[in-house]
Image (cartoon, helix red, strand yellow):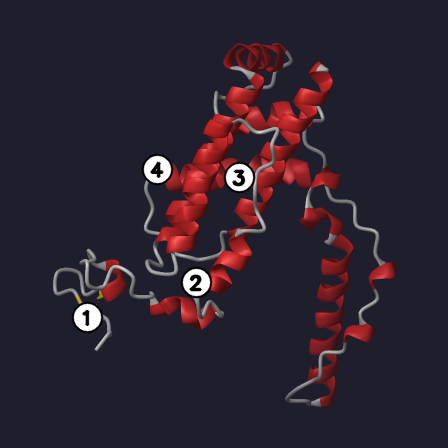
Amino acid sequence: MNTPTVSSAADAVVYPADEFRTPVNVLAPDQRNFHFGVTSIEVLYARISQCSLNSYVPEDIRVQFDTARNLYLHAFYVYRFYVVAERHVLTTLELAIRECIGDKTLVAFQKELKARGINFKKGLRLYLEYLAQHQLIQNEDFPRWHRRNRMAAEDAYRDKVFKLMEEQGLEEYQWDESEIDESAFNVEWDYVRDLSEILPKIRNNHSHGSTMLHNQVSLSFVNVSVIINKMFERTATAQK
């Protein structure tokens, strides 16, 4: 029976999928996926395959990105691979920026910022700042930025529903898409700025060691693929 056991050392739940696999059970699905609608590896593949790198990106970077995608795909069998995949895709992002922009240029940019009283250590935060300031990535590049007004409208509608249910003592309310007015919103959101701050923090959490476990990594893959694609494409176009 595929049920979790309890470790006597720390009274921690140990799932069979967390243990070292054997040739017999190496392809046994990690049933934690089923709780989130990932009922087959085809479902997960459909999500992952939407993120890809274009022909502007060098092969060595595409290989590393596909390594991250393979880890993501194999999370169907080992749930803990989700965070491993996210860590690798963010490492690939840093590698891609260094290869595209060049270490000398990034060091010079770091010194330029320091002269202006802005101190960034060498690393992903500095590299993303370079991309942002040189317009190699822009808000319009990202699908989530284009959904900003929709997300704001949904949040407002959700608040309205909760308030209505509380006032009228309702136990349920039918979600009605026609009641969501996206046109009423024009959200100003510097998504590139937010990514420049958030992605390095996620990367550092993984790099410094963590027991964090979650499957919400698809957004990181989308954002990384956009950044790498646009960066190499714009750099190549500028050099022509």
Q: Nearer the viewer, mark 1 or mark 4?
A: 1
Q: Nearer the viewer, mark 2 or mark 3?
A: 2
> Residue flagged by tag 4: what amino acid is it?
His
Q: Is residue 233 above or below residue 188?
A: above
| Residue at disc 4, secondary structure | loop
Mark 2, Cα crowd under 10 Å, few <14 / some 14-19 / many 20+, is some
Percent across and percent down for residue 144 are 68, 50
Q: Are marks 4 and 3 in contact (CB under 8 Å)?
A: no
> Residue flagged by tag 2: what amino acid is it?
Ile
Say which quadrant the N terminus sits in: bottom left
> Residue flagged by tag 1: what amino acid is it?
Thr
Residue that mark 2 sits on: 41
Residue that appears at 62% across and 22% down: 130
Residue that appears at 67% across and 21% down: 236
As drawn, is 15 to the left or to the right of 150? left
Q: Nearer the viewer, mark 4 or mark 2?
A: 2
Task: Using the image, tell me which numbered label, if any, was put on residue 199.
Answer: 3
| Residue at disc 2, secondary structure | helix
Tell which circle, 1 or 4, labels the residue nearer the N-terminal end. Answer: 1
Task: Using the image, tell me which numbered label, if any, was put on residue 208.
Answer: 4
Mark 3, Cα crowd under 10 Å, few <14 / some 14-19 / many 20+, is some
Percent across and percent down for residue 233 are 67, 28
Task: Using the image, tell me which numbered label, if any, was put on residue 5.
Answer: 1
| Residue at disc 1, secondary structure | strand
Rounded to the nearest whole Å, what is the CA distance between mark 4 and mark 3? 14 Å
Of residue 94 and residue 122, the one placed in the foreground of this image is 94
Q: Are marks 4 and 2 in contact (CB under 8 Å)?
A: no
Tell which circle, 3 or 1, labels the residue nearer the N-terminal end. Answer: 1
Q: Which image quadrant for residue 23? A: bottom left
> Residue flagged by tag 3: what amino acid is it?
Leu
Tell which circle, 1 or 2, labels the residue nearer the N-terminal end. Answer: 1
